[in-house]
Image (spheres, rainbow, N blue to C red):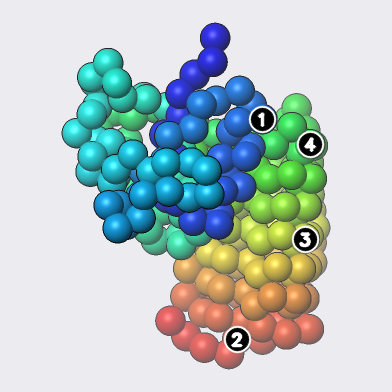
Amino acid sequence: MTKELAIVGASGHGKVVADIAEQLGFIVNFYDDAYPSKTHIEHWPIHGTCADLIALNNTSTAPNDVVVAIGNNNIRQQKIQLLQQNSFNLITLIHPTAVISQYATIAQGSVVFAGAIINAFANIGVGCIVNTSAIIEHDCAIGDFTHICPNTALAGGVIIGTKSWVGIGSQVKQLITIGDNCIIGAGSTVVKNIPDNVTAFGSPAVVIKNH
């Protein structure tokens, strides 16, 4: 039976999440806080704000399954935790072309995009984004609400903290630790540990800013 899915966040990121959801057989219902000034995203109507979705909770018209399609890590965390507090079923979406080891674990609310690879004993936290063609090798640990951008490659045993962002095309050497609330600039090569709350960039990556 086809199930309805609420997607919170109607942006470019939301379009790709909706595409994954439809390929998995869901009927998509968008909610975005820009409503009613924004009523559609492409051909999909926006049904209301996140607050409107919560107000529908436990009614016959409310989709109980939900995913948050917001790229900003802090806002994604806020929305996910709000929806969890209101008893929504936070689901995980995995694109049919992603390759996921039977020994990997992916927590609720995460989305894995087309062509991504997650290898044995890797652990993906709550509300993460593993974007297009990202590679997460064996024994990596990705903290909650972290975004691994397209074409990023993490070698074995990499640890990344919560709410971090690893930019497009970056590479991270095996056994490296990247802290919480970090930004790794696009195309960086990370060969040394990165502390919490910094932006790092370059090949090799160096800290360029504290948050």
Which tag is nearer the camera, tag 3 or tag 1? 1
Looking at the picture, does residue 122 appear above or below residue 151?
above
Asked which quadrant contains residue 56, the reply is: top left
Q: How far apart are marks 2 and 1 (CA)?
A: 40 Å
N-term mark: 3 or 1: 1
CA neighbours of label 4 inside 10 A, class few (<14), some (14 to 19), many (20+): few
Q: Distance between the residues labelled 2 and 4?
A: 35 Å
For label 3, the SS is loop
Q: What residue type is labelled 4?
A: Thr
| Closest to the observer, 156 or 187 | 187
Can residue 198 be spotted in the picture? yes
The image's mark for residue 97 is 4
At x 74%, y 44%, the residue is 114
At x 28%, y 36%, the residue is 53
CA neighbours of label 1 inside 10 A, class few (<14), some (14 to 19), many (20+): few
Q: What residue type is labelled 3?
A: Asn
Q: Quadrant of the N terminus?
A: top right
Mark 3 highlights which residue? 151
Q: Which amino acid does label 2 sit on?
A: Val
Mark 1 highlights which residue? 23
Which tag is nearer the camera, tag 2 or tag 1? 1
N-term mark: 3 or 2: 3
Q: How far apart are marks 1 and 4 (CA)?
A: 11 Å
N-term mark: 2 or 4: 4
